[in-house]
Image (cartoon, rainbow, N blue to C red):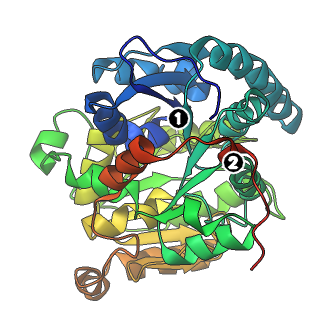
Amino acid sequence: MVNRSISESGKRKICVVTGTRAEYGLLRYLMEEIDQSANLELQVIATGMHLSPEFGLTYRAIENDGFKIDRKVEMLLSSDSAVGIAKATGLGMIGFADALDQLRPDILVVLGDRFEILAAVTAALFAKIPVAHLHGGETTEGAYDEGIRHAITKMSHLHFVAAEDYRRRVLQLGENPENVHVVGGLGVDAIQRTALLTKPELAKTISLGERNLLVTYHPETLGESTSQVQMQMFLEALRQLDDDIHFLFTYPNADSDGRAIINMIDEFILEYPDRASAHQTLGQLRYWSAMKIADAVIGNSSSGLLEAPTLYTPTVDIGNRQRGRLRPKSVVHTDCNTQDIREAIQKAISEAFRETVLTSANPLGSGGATRKIVDCLAKQELKTELLQKRFYSI
């Protein structure tokens, strides 16, 4: 058996790592079910953007939801350059090495593809802690997250994927089929469990218009042009839309060149103070509520492909950051140039397209992922063979 300390309660210790507001929104109800389980004990490590004043100190949202944060791993630097991100990853490995040594979980649970998660999983590899990876097998060809995700897959031992296509990719990477489980999308579960706000209720806390676009644009870290050039073309397309459209921006993640995009958003809002607003973080309740009432989700956030289809909200996906993910019928893809973006938005908010979206389904399923994951975490045998992975050849 894998050598682990036993908690005072005699339960299996499941440690969940979260580094961003969006990721926590997907993990929240999984954490809740782990915490309520008769057989599992929840541990929480907060890191990355959660601990940054610049991004809203969102660890407070975790605590406000009733969770105890067992460890905080500080790792973000003031620089968002390539050098800064690489150094932050190194700091994260140091911090996670100490945190995991102190907590000694039986299984480490991580989601996605960010550099904070890479640091956590690398530390777990050396500590011989089994890793359960959520939402592996997906592809995002326009960002270095693509390489990070697949690296995490190879350092993980249990895989909970959102669709059969993603399962096949994980198998292609040499993972044992017995340890790869298709559970659906966590975002679908989270939305179904959340009582969303109506438009009048939401309008009490944020500025809304008659028509609204929910806008999130992250740096395309492997793009041929710079993030600033791409963002300028995107904003110019927004300028050319009808005057009665309101823009609700959320700031990008802490990626390379993220601060440059934030500065451009702030300048746009100064230009259109009556039609645009921006937020460090809306929190999951307001974000999904805004997504539900929006005429469309615009930008290159994964939420436009993973969660918006469940709310029957059209999405305009710009550029290559999300290229390779399953693309629901509710998504209009466009290259990153002003004319194409404008035309894609006009298509997405048209009455004809919105009627089509109402009959489309989310390819990531209709719910149930959380329960499947918790059941597996409780029942999985933690034999030494789980850590001694063999490459499974297809």
Q: Residue, x 41% and y 63% (percent of image)?
A: 183
Element on which disc 1 rests: loop
The three-letter code of the residue at mark 1 reads Thr
Q: Is residue 366 above or below residue 390?
A: below
Q: CA distance from mark 1 to mark 2?
A: 32 Å
> What secondary structure is marked by label 2?
helix
Residue 20 is labelled as 1
The image shows residue 39 at horizontal and vertical percentages of 33, 32
Which badge, 1 or 2, comes first in the chain's sequence?
1
Q: Residue at x 57, y 34 (%)?
A: 108
Q: Would you name the residue on which mark 2 appears?
A: 385
The residue sitting at 76% across, 41% down in the picture is 256
**Residue situated in front as seen by the camera: 92 or 175:** 175
User: Image quarter for residue 136?
Assistant: bottom right
Query: Is residue 162 positioned above or below 68 on the image?
Result: below
Q: Is residue 68 visible?
A: yes
Q: Mark 2: which amino acid?
A: Glu
User: Is residue 141 rendered to the left or right of residue 369?
Assistant: right
